[in-house]
Image (cartoon, rainbow, N blue to C red):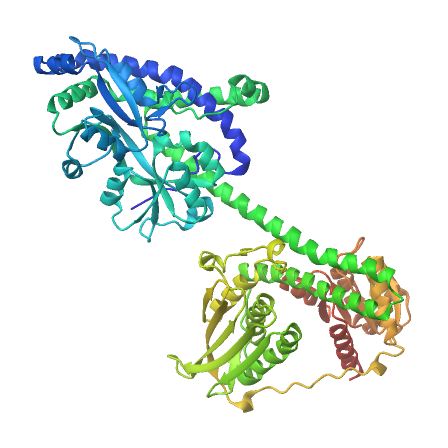
């Protein structure tokens, strides 16, 4: 069964709602002029060719008309464009009113009169017909079996209507007709109840007092969809906009009929003659002419506010009318393709808008904290306690900001497919204990109980420690952030048998008693930038990239991830990854680099940095540990300073990449081509904000000895400098 998501519902997206209003009104205005006239001509031709017996009442039928005088029609109120009541005059309105006026003169040997009587719903109207209060009911949709059960006769078809369902716009992409669906239905709407029973017998029916309540119920999550005729979309456009709903077509249609008491076959015959005498195209014209939504905006207002739009709409309507009369398959296919392209464009635009909104807010939040505490630090710098507190909070906010940027960069690397497996032998128990030690202090300070259990048979495995660390750091960070004080977090590592020979299935389960995740959001948790509550609502920073990164890394390592959660009770995340078993003797022993400040004393660094503020900070940090520092404002100045200096005057160069006049890559290439071998081989470390893997590779290709990304960690910088200087000494 194929269902097509429709984006043509007027005003289903915020920026389009105002623009659709003049379009819709102009469309209805022109169609009500052109279509009924054309339909009337078509109907006239049909009349000329029809069977004349359908226009003549039999003696028995004339006797019924003379005896009863007026045909009493019970109609469903507030069911436009089919039937309704004018709120000002109390007069019947809608298609049924137009239909009865047309039917009054169709019989050649007798004038018919009708009296229209409103009822709250179809079921009430049928009940009134059984009691003899009305003679027939419209509109009714029943099959023969249901009609027999109800004790009524169902007339010939008056009108066929494509069926749709209205769903919440945010759930439209995940709506499936074969799921367990809760369908909203008006109380007493026996026609739609029969439709659902016939076409979707497994759906659960949820009844509401009226259409407004049905649509409101969908927006509140009390129902999943509202079954509706496509002809009724325009009359409900205002409510559709209000509750952010969107229409999805089905592959079914429903027919509108009159219902007549089974005890009144003569009236049944009269009604069928009327139906056969009024062509379907005329009926369609009646429906369209009664489909203009109630609005306080006049055509003059539209013409004044949107002159060019009106001209464009009129041109478009002329084209639509031409296509309508041509009725070609090609036109329908082009319309379908246009709708699909518009849906794709809107989805892409929404994703871009959501990304920019999230990034703007989440970057500004720590930035505002940094700037605010800096101002407070300036004001209270003589207060040691406040000064220490503000510096600590500035550091925390800086780490949050760096984490957001790193997540975006990591997601970019993953999507480009540049991940590489870098396996080493490592202790599974030690890895788990390291994670525990990192988070235990944070949990304890927050008042969260953190427990750790390990149950493995093989302690040593081949694994990519960097990727595993990123997976579990994100999971534990979420557990820490979303578990309130007094709660608990439990981490358990278990080894299970694995189908692959020489491998074990290492399963890590992280459970918390935090705020939990709603059932509706769980299917979206691995989508980029998705968050159940943004940081404006729950005061927790993040981009919504942590779990998407986790999922992609777990998939890359050949593992699985499962999340179970209940709102208000907590979340359990289970990660299972197959790892190759190793021996302890295979663990590489790397010498621990201990940084001795004496190694820096008297060493001269040439710092190539165009930003004055960053240069000032770097010079201060480097001089504090004993370096002598000279600055070059760009790559060209750096090259000229080295070229004009004595041999071995500089011991090392810290090189920025993006600088005016000459960038760091080009400056490094020139230095490596110097005729003096000592100057040409001077150690050069990239110190840059260019943090992608491609930037790192380019740095080494240009001849640099190392790459450090900004903002640089002071301890990492010192270790890198010490490592380079020790190699030079050897």
Residue 294 relative to residue 681: left or right: left
Residue 407 position by quadrant: bottom right
Taking the image as shown, residue 587 lies to the left or right of residue 210, namely right
- The residue sitting at 77% across, 69% down in the picture is 684
**Near-viewer residue (135 or 537):** 135
Give residue 233's position: percent from left, percent from top. 39, 32
Count of marks overlaid on the render: 0
Q: Quadrant of residue 164?
A: top left
Residue at x 59%, y 78% (from the top left corner): 435
Q: Who's the residue at 8% across and 15% down the image?
A: 60
Residue 649, image x, y percentages: 89, 73
Q: Nearer the viewer, residue 155 or 259?
A: 259
Rendering coords of residue 124 (x, y %)? 27, 33
Occupied quadrant, residue 133: top left
Could you tell me which quadrant the C terminus lies in? bottom right
Q: Position of residue 696 (x, y in %)?
A: 67, 65
Q: Please tell me whether residue 270 is drawn above or below residue 124 in the rendered image.
A: above
């Amino acid at each position: 069964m194929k269902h097509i998501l429709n984006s043509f519902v007027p005003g289903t997206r915020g920026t389009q709602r105002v623009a659709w209003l003049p379009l819709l009104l102009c469309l209805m205005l022109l169609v009500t002029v052109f279509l009924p006239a054309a339909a009337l001509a078509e109907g006239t031709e049909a009349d000329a060719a029809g069977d004349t017996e359908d226009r003549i009442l039999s003696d028995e039928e004339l006797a019924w008309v003379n005896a009863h005088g007026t045909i009493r029609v019970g109609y469903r109120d507030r069911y436009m464009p089919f039937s309704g009541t004018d709120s000002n005059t109390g007069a019947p309105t809608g298609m049924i009113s137009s239909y009865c006026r047309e039917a009054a003169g169709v019989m050649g040997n007798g004038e018919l009169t009708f009296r229209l009587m409103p009822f709250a719903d179809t079921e009430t109207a049928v009940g009134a017909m059984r009691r003899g209060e009305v003679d027939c009911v419209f509109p009714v949709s029943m099959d023969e079996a249901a009609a027999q059960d109800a004790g009524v006769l169902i007339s010939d078809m008056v009108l066929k209507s494509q069926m749709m369902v209205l769903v919440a716009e945010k759930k439209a992409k995940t709506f499936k007709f074969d799921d367990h669906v809760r369908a909203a239905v008006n109380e007493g709407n026996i026609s739609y109840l029969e439709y659902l029973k016939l076409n979707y017998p497994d759906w659960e029916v949820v009844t509401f007092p009226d259409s407004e309540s049905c649509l409101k119920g969908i927006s509140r999550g009390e129902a999943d969809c509202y079954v509706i005729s496509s002809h009724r979309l325009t009359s409900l456009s205002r409510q559709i906009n209000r509750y952010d709903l969107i229409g999805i077509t089905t592959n079914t249609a429903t027919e509108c009929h009159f219902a007549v008491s089974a005890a009144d076959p003569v009236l049944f015959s009269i009604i069928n003659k009327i139906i056969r005498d009024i062509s379907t195209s005329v009926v369609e014209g009646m429906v369209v002419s009664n489909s203009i939504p109630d609005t306080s905006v006049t055509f003059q207002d539209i013409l004044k506010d949107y002159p060019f739009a009106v001209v464009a709409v009129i041109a478009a309507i002329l084209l639509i009318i031409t296509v309508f009369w041509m009725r070609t398959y090609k036109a329908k296919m082009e319309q379908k393709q246009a709708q699909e392209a518009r849906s794709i464009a809107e989805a892409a635009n929404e994703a871009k808008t959501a990304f920019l909104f999230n990034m703007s807010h989440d970057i500004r939040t720590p930035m505002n904290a940094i700037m605010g505490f800096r101002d407070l630090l300036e004001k209270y710098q003589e207060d040691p306690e406040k000064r220490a507190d503000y510096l600590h909070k500035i550091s925390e906010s800086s780490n949050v900001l760096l984490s957001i940027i790193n997540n975006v960069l990591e997601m970019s690397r993953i999507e480009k497919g540049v991940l590489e497996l870098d396996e080493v032998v490592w202790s599974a128990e030690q890895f788990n204990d390291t994670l525990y030690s990192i988070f235990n202090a944070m949990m304890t300070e927050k008042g969260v109980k953190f427990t750790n259990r390990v149950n493995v048979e093989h302690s040593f495995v081949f694994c990519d420690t960097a990727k595993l660390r990123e997976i579990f750091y994100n999971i534990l960070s979420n557990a820490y952030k979303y578990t309130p004080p007094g709660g608990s977090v439990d981490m358990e590592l278990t080894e299970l048998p694995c189908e692959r020979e020489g491998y074990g299935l290492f399963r890590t389960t992280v459970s918390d008693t935090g705020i939990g995740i709603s059932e509706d959001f769980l299917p979206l948790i691995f989508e980029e930038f998705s968050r159940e509550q943004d940081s404006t609502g729950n005061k927790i920073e993040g981009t919504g990239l942590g779990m998407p990164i986790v999922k992609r890394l777990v998939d890359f390592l050949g593992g699985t991830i499962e999340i179970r959660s209940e709102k208000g009770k907590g979340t359990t995340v289970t990660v299972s990854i197959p790892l190759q078993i190793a021996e302890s003797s295979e663990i590489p022993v790397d010498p621990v680099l201990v940084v001795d400040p004496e190694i820096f004393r008297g060493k001269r660094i040439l710092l190539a940095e165009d930003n004055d503020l960053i240069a000032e900070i770097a010079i201060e940090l480097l001089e504090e540990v004993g370096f002598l520092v000279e600055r070059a404002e760009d790559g060209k100045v750096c090259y000229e300073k080295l070229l004009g200096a004595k041999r071995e005057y500089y011991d090392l160069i810290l090189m920025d990449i993006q600088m005016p006049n000459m960038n760091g890559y080009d400056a490094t290439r020139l230095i490596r081509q110097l005729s003096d071998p000592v100057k040409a081989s001077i150690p050069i470390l990239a110190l840059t904000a260019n943090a992608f893997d491609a930037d790192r590779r380019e740095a080494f290709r240009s001849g640099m000895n190392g790459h450090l990304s900004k903002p640089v960690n002071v301890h990492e910088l010192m270790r890198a400098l010490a490592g380079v200087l020790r190699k030079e000494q050897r």
